[in-house]
Amino acid sequence: MLSFWAGLAANIVGMTVLVYVVYFRRHFRRDLVLAYIALSMGIFAVTMLLSGSGAGMGLGLGLFGILSIIRLRSDTLTQEEVAYYFISLAIGLVNGLHPDPAWFSPAVTAALVLVMFLADHPGFAPRTQRQTVTLEKAYPRNEELVQALQELLGARVLRTVVIELDMVRDLTIVDVRFRINPPRMPYEYQGTYQLANIPQPASSNQQGSWS
């Protein structure tokens, strides 16, 4: 019984930290917050019931696999969001099984949350990005393609994957990974200056005498 309560508490606390502290503050997608919480708690409940019944765990995991495929195909998710999706699934599954000793599932949950916190940290490769670029010209040679992309993006191209090269429509669609150049610091003059000596005009006040 102690392992059950420990698993339940670990699932609630772990998903709260993962979703509200780590995910939402970095990706700002409110609809997936509900999806991750519902997924983890649902898997926790069903896994707990299956582990205590005569139904095989293979049947339950197969159902979860089918539901996962349907969920992933129903909306466009980035690779980062897919990673959070599977971590939420894993947290619910581990805590739903709540194996002995009681500290095991909380420790695994904390480890999974820590992995996502570090792996998705904004400080990791902040200037490295990926985009799918459509160019209104066919570039059959990689050297010309890289040069055109670097001029267009103002960045250093690391890798290119040509998705489509249409010589008839003069079109190139390429998946490009690049590193943004660091911003240039504004020029600051570090020297000293002084005003030039400007000659003062002669005084126009003159005194006259009258006789």
Image (cartoon, helix red, strand yellow):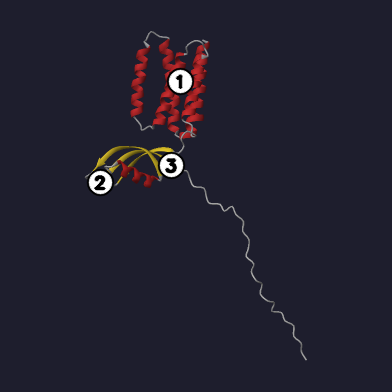
**Image height check: is 91 above or below 54?**
below
- Of the pair 131 and 52, the residue shown nearer to us: 131
- For image coordinates 35% across by 38% down, the residue present is 176
Farthest residue to the bottom: give it: 211
Tag 1 near tag 3, CB within 8 Å: no
Tag 2 near tag 3, CB within 8 Å: no
Of badges 1 and 3, nearer the viewer stands: 3
x, y (%) of residue 34?
44, 28
Q: Work out which quarter of the rendered image holds the C terminus and state it.
A: bottom right
- For image coordinates 74% across by 83% down, the residue present is 207
Q: Give SS at disc 3.
A: strand
**Residue picked out by circle 2:** 170
Kindly report the distance in space between the C-alpha atoms of the residues bearing marks 2 and 3: 27 Å
> Which amino acid lies under the numbered mark 2 shown in the image of this protein?
Asp
**Residue picked out by circle 3:** 180
Considering only order in the chain, which callout, 3 or 1, is on the residue closer to the N terminus? 1
Considering only order in the chain, which callout, 3 or 2, is on the residue closer to the N terminus? 2
x, y (%) of residue 32?
43, 30
Q: Local crowd at mark 3 within 10 Å, few (<14), some, or many (≥20)?
A: some
Q: Give SS at disc 2.
A: loop
Please identify the quarter of the rendering in which residue 210 is found: bottom right
Farthest residue to the left: give it: 168
- For image coordinates 49% across by 21% down, the residue present is 111
Please identify the quarter of the rendering in which residue 138 is found: top left
**Residue picked out by circle 1:** 91
Q: Give SS at disc 1.
A: helix
> Which amino acid lies under the numbered mark 1 shown in the image of this protein?
Ile
